[in-house]
Amino acid sequence: MVLIGPVFAGFVISRFIAGELPGHHTLTAAEHPILFYLIISALGYGAFKTTQLSLLFVLGHFGGRWKR
């Protein structure tokens, strides 16, 4: 569960490179560039915030053990 942030960030980066979002109606950067980049930006922000929380949790968890 701790790695959910980095996994989500990897998904967003791979979808940005591919230029499309999967789903029932595929959204591509070529067909709807403004909408695609707005959605990818929002997903990227959320992904990197969850990565930050994951790192804080790991550092807090292991930081307490190293001081003992």
Image: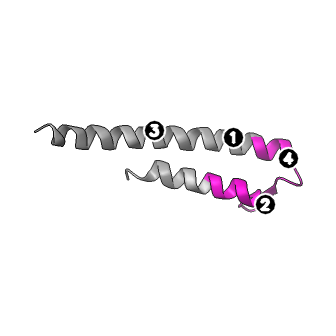
Q: Earlier in the sequence, mark 3 or mark 4?
A: 4
- Indicate the position of residue 42 as horizontal and vertical percent values: 66, 39
Within-10-Å neighbours for mark 4: few <14, some 14–19, many 20+:
few
Report the mark closest to the observer, 2 or 1.
1
* Amino acid type for the residue under numbered disc 2: Thr
Viewer-side residue, 65 vs 11: 65
Tell me the residue that label 4 is attached to: 33
Q: Quadrant of residue 53?
A: top left
Question: SS for tag 2?
Answer: loop
Tell me the residue that label 1 is attached to: 41
Q: Are marks 3 and 4 in contact (CB under 8 Å)?
A: no
* Amino acid type for the residue under numbered disc 1: Ser
Report the mark closest to the observer, 2 or 4.
4
Rendered image coloring scheme: one colour
Q: Earlier in the sequence, mark 2 or mark 1?
A: 2
Location of the C terminus (image quadrant): top left
Magenta range: 12-37
* Amino acid type for the residue under numbered disc 3: Gln
